[in-house]
Amino acid sequence: MREFEKSSLDHNLGSSHEGQEYAVPCNLDRYRSLTMGSISWWDDVSKVLSEVSDQKLITLPRRAYSDPYLSDRYLMSPKKRTHELSATFDIWDTHLKRPLVGKTVRDDKYSNPTVDDWDILFREGLLVYYASRQTYGVERIYDIVVVQQGPMLLLEKIEGDEMAKVAKARRFTAEMGINILNYLALTYTKLERKGVYQGDTAPHNIILDKNSELLPRLIDFNTSPSVRPHYEGYDVYNRKGYINSTMRRLVDLVTQGIGGGRDSLAIREELVDFEDSFWKEPYEKFEEVGADISQFMKHYGISPKWQGYI
């Protein structure tokens, strides 16, 4: 693997994140003072999202699915991909000349979306916007438009494979696997300090960005407790269990995915012990997990990647 080059990340992440390409999405502009505010704790995030959700669709122009032009700017492919809770479309941004992903609520014979479902999706869009301003490790949102009865999120199209797919093929070197764990722990730490939790941290919701040295990016915040405060699959007060189950699953995935590299056998054995520690001595914060991974890297002389892009 070629050496990490900061300039490549500057091109793929830095310029688009801070520069003109990542301007405030036009339909989110009125929420900027809220989403960019000093939000420190969980309840504050939920409060802000609740307040802006009350105003959700008043001024947004409505477009039908049959209209390929979502606006003067966005062109939509008619091909729909159906997921458990959502549907996605390929979008072309005619201004930026780049592909995006349009995400809306699943609406077919197997589902019956309600106003609450649309509200949840809208809240997800606001949360992704806020979270992506905190760290490069989160997918970006470019806009929100309205189709038929509700919103469509226009999200960054990240080129790369799901973390689970890469691990299954045993395509990690030991160094890369540890670096991915380290970056994810740092990303979750930064979000945790702002009271933001992803919700479903399954490996298929982590994309290894092939245009940015396989930097792991979080996608899909639809089951975040900030979006679904009463989501039955998540206890908002059981953060300790959430933290340990998340990192235990990721450590196990990396352990299975290491296919070679310097000290790979020894590192795999250490990771097995590390995975056990989440049962024996559970962590209280993601920050504590990150500190232990950092010490692990120092012990094996592994240099951290992507440190300027946490």
Image (cartoon, grey):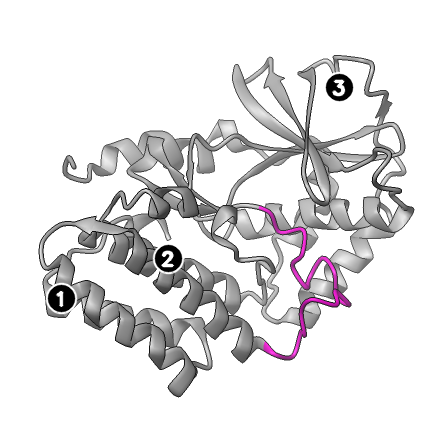
First in residue order: circle 1 vs circle 3: 3
User: At x 74% / y 35%, what residue is drawn?
Assistant: 104
The amino acid marked with disc number 1 is Ala
Residue 300 coordinates in the image, percent (x, y): 11, 65
The amino acid marked with disc number 3 is Leu
The answer to whether residue 83 is magenta is no
Q: Is residue 190 left or right of residue 146?
A: left
In the picture of the structure, the residue carrying the numbered disc 3 is: 70
Q: Quadrant of residue 184?
A: bottom left
Q: Quadrant of residue 273?
A: bottom left
Q: Is residue 227 above or below residue 309?
A: below
Q: Which mark is residue 266?
A: 1
Residue 266 coordinates in the image, percent (x, y): 13, 66
User: At x 27% / y 43%, what residue is drawn?
Assistant: 171
Q: Which residues are magenta?
A: 220-238
Q: Secondary structure at mark 1?
A: helix
The answer to whether residue 232 is magenta is yes
Residue nearer the viewer, 23 or 278: 278
Q: Secondary structure at mark 3?
A: loop
Furthest residue in direction bottom, as rendered: 281
- In front: label 1 or label 3: 1
